[in-house]
Amino acid sequence: MFPELTVKVVEEETTLREFVGSLGKNYLYAFDRRVIGVSVNGKRLWPSAVLKKGDKVVIYPIITGG
């Protein structure tokens, strides 16, 4: 249902939100709803952060329990 653990390398300069959107509508929807976490080179960044070629992006589901 939710996107699974994904590791990608940025190939051209873009914003974080645009990069996530380029992976598909499910990723962008989950990103906007904060159902997935995204780190770039091991750091959390704002959606408007500019990514550079070669940056490593890790997308992971946020697991909650109760």
Image: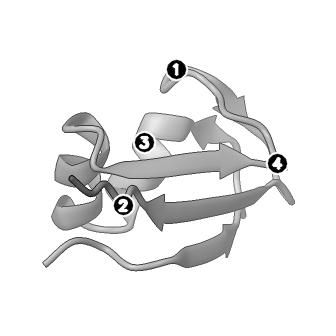
Dot 1: within a 10 Å radius of its alpha carbon, few (fewer than 14), some, or many (20 or more) residues? few
Residue tagged by mark 4? Answer: 42
* Circle 3: residue type: Glu
Q: Nearer the viewer, mark 2 or mark 4?
A: 2
- Quick check: marks 2 and 1 in contact, CB under 8 Å? no
Q: Residue at x 22, y 71 (%)?
A: 2
* Circle 2: residue type: Ile
Left or right: 49 in relation to 3: right
Q: Nearer the viewer, mark 4 or mark 3?
A: 4
For marks 4 and 3 on the same chain, the one whose residue lies earlier in the sequence: 3
Left or right: 35 in relation to 33: right
**Helix, strand or loop under label 4:** loop
Give the Cα distance between marks 2 and 1: 24 Å
Camera-side residue: 42 or 56?
42
For marks 2 and 1 on the same chain, the one whose residue lies earlier in the sequence: 1
Label total for image = 4
Q: Residue at x 17, y 61 (%)?
A: 25
Residue tagged by mark 2? Answer: 63
Q: Nearer the viewer, mark 1 or mark 4?
A: 4
**Helix, strand or loop under label 2:** loop
Disc assigned to residue 18: 3
Residue tagged by mark 1? Answer: 48
Camera-side residue: 2 or 15?
2
Dot 2: within a 10 Å radius of its alpha carbon, few (fewer than 14), some, or many (20 or more) residues? few
